[in-house]
Image (cartoon, helix red, strand yellow):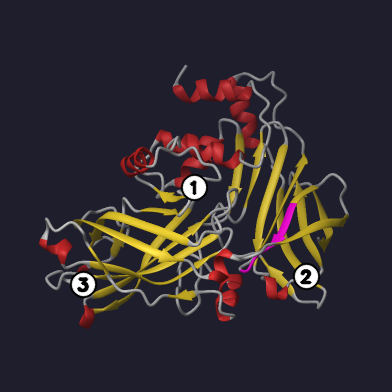
Amino acid sequence: MDRFEEKLKDSLTKKIKLPNEYKYIIRNALYKENEEKRRRHRFIKILAMSCTFLLLITSVVGAVNLSRYIYNYYSDNKGMDEAIKEGYIDESNMEYVASSNVEEIEAVNTEIKIKDMLMDDHNLSFTFSVKLDENIDMNKINTITFPDMIIYDENNTLIYCDSRDRFNEFCTNNNLQYEFSQNSDNYIANEQSSYIKDRYPELSTIDVVYNFNTMVYSYPKCKKLYIDLKKINISESEAGDSIGKIINGEWKIDYDVSEKFYNRETLMYNVKSCSDERLNITEAYVTETGMVYDFTFKDEPMLDGSETVEESREKILNFPISTVFDEYVENENGEKFYHVQGNMESSGTIYSAYGDFEHWQTFDLIKSKATNKLTLYFSISFHGHTTENVVVELEKR
């Protein structure tokens, strides 16, 4: 029996529950499976691994759209765009930070600063300005990344770290008992994307956008953010997988978070009525940049537990799963808001082999447009046979 069959057999003998952290259990297992390629192939790996015990449907990869300040070509987030137009962004006036490591001449002449940033419960975005050594040809640069960057707050909440070595160093220095890739409220799990936004050859500077997104664990309402990095990877490849040059140094950014971010509040909604009593709306809330809802229900199981490994594999591959579509939310003024193009954090569906169904979605409804009552509309196609139109009435707590 090969490794895949062993995992399949083991998973199919257990009835897996769907707690709020369920999707992170999948991700953590995949991280250990192939740590180096996790970011680039996260969706593919999750889908492949899910064949052992569930089916996973999620939207295309994407992140945060920061209006005229930040534009991410992977995503079109109208909610984020509207929030920024209303001033929900912090434009920094900080000075450039030089490397404290002077062993490499290029590191000495390379500086970095934050130009602007945005933070709410589930979105975090920075525009970094990188000032490069004048001997580096900016025209050949297609990607700039910070492979060992670590972000944390004044309470040592680890907001982002994708380097095991930096993670271990941070935990040792601060006497923390975190385990790499085992996420919690104190160690946030993220989807992350980055890209070059602008170039200024006359100043030898390039603007690099880093977008982060999380759903299960909220970003803290912190007053300080600390960003440390020791490597800047400059590549001529658009995919960033071909290392052109690594500048080794040590850059430490100490950032004062704007009051608008650490005093942010989330509007929570209760379910007043639902046209389908089988559905359990587990959460519905509105932030400065969007609305999120989540529901679960017990659907028809793919398996009954008596199948062999081959029978289970065949049933899972051919089972007509239920799907959710035509989702939108309407406020009391009759304005309609639709789902954003996002990533696995902002939109997706989990369907387990034993019928446990969970779906979550993010809409472009922001706090300034939220009313005391909201109406949620969506349709469910049950196994491709019958379709039901669902109406959920929500009321602000």
Give the labeled residue for mark 2: 330
Q: Quadrant of residue 253?
A: bottom left
Q: Which label sits in the foreground, 1 or 2?
A: 2
Q: Residues within 10 Å of mark 1 (few under 14, many from 20)?
A: some
Residue at image position (70%, 71%) is 337
Where the C terminus falls, by quadrant?
bottom right
In the depicted structure, whether residue 287 falls above or below residue 36? below
What main secondary structure does the magenta stretch of the protein show? strand
Report whether 141 appears left or right of 262. left
Chain part drawn in magenta? 283-288
In magenta stretch: residue 329: no
Where is residue 292? Give x, y as percent.
67, 59
Residue at image position (58%, 53%) is 218
Label 3 secondary element: helix
Give the labeled residue for mark 1: 43
Where is residue 9? Give x, y as percent.
57, 21
Q: Earlier in the sequence, mark 1 or mark 2?
A: 1
Give the labeled residue for mark 3: 138
Where is residue 229? Give x, y as percent.
30, 55
